[in-house]
Image (spheres, rainbow, N blue to C red):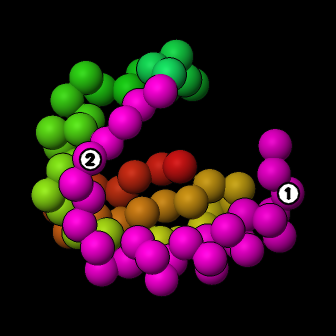
C-alpha cells in the first residue's frame, strides 16, 4: 500500500497528462475488487473528459465531464 506522500507525487505527475484529455479505452484487469466493477464501466466512461485529478487520502479521484468520479 503506498504512503500518502507517494500518492500525492503520483497525482502531481499524472495530472498534466490526464486532465483535459478524453477517456478512449478502459481496461479492467481484475473485477474482484472491494466493490463490484460494473460490466458497462468502459461504455460509461468512454468519450468523457477528465476535468480534474485530485487526491483524497490514498485514493486518486478523476472527475469526469459526465459528472462521474473515477476512484483509483
Q: Left or right: 20 with respect to 36?
A: left
- Place of residue 50 in the rendered image (x, y in percent of width and height, measured from the top left): 31, 69
Measuring 26% from the left and 47% from the top, which residue is drawn there?
Answer: 25
- Place of residue 30 in the rendered image (x, y in percent of width and height, measured from the top left): 50, 22
The answer to whether residue 70 of the structure is visible from this angle is: yes
The answer to whether residue 67 of the structure is visible from this angle is: no
Measuring 31% from the left and 42% from the top, which residue is drawn there?
Answer: 26
Q: Quadrant of the N terminus?
A: top right
Task: Give the secondary structure at mark 2.
Answer: loop
Q: Is residue 35 magenta?
A: no
Residue of label 1: 3
Q: Is residue 17 magenta?
A: yes
Task: Give the secondary structure at mark 1.
Answer: loop
> Relative to 31, is 25 above or below?
below
Seen as rendered, the residue at the extreme top is 32
What's the CA distance linking mark 2 and mark 1?
28 Å
Q: Nearer the viewer, residue 54 or 17?
A: 17
Q: Left or right: 40 with respect to 60?
A: left
> Which residues lie in the magenta part?
1-29
Query: Which of the two marks, 2 or 1, is nearer to us in this view?
Result: 2
Residue of label 2: 25
* Within-10-Å neighbours for mark 1: few <14, some 14–19, many 20+: few
- Place of residue 9 in the rendered image (x, y in percent of width and height, measured from the top left): 73, 74
* Within-10-Å neighbours for mark 2: few <14, some 14–19, many 20+: few
Measuring 25% from the left and 23% from the top, which residue is drawn there?
Answer: 39
Q: Left or right: 32 with respect to 58?
A: left
- Place of residue 32 in the rendered image (x, y in percent of width and height, measured from the top left): 52, 16
Amino acid at each position: 500500500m503506498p504512503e500518502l506522500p507517494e500518492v500525492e507525487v503520483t497525482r502531481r505527475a499524472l495530472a498534466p497528462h490526464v486532465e483535459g484529455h478524453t477517456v478512449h479505452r478502459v481496461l479492467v484487469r481484475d473485477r474482484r475488487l472491494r466493490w463490484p466493477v460494473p460490466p458497462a464501466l468502459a461504455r460509461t466512461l468512454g468519450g468523457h473528459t477528465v476535468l480534474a485529478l485530485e487526491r483524497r487520502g490514498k485514493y486518486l479521484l478523476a472527475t469526469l465531464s459526465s459528472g462521474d468520479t473515477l476512484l483509483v
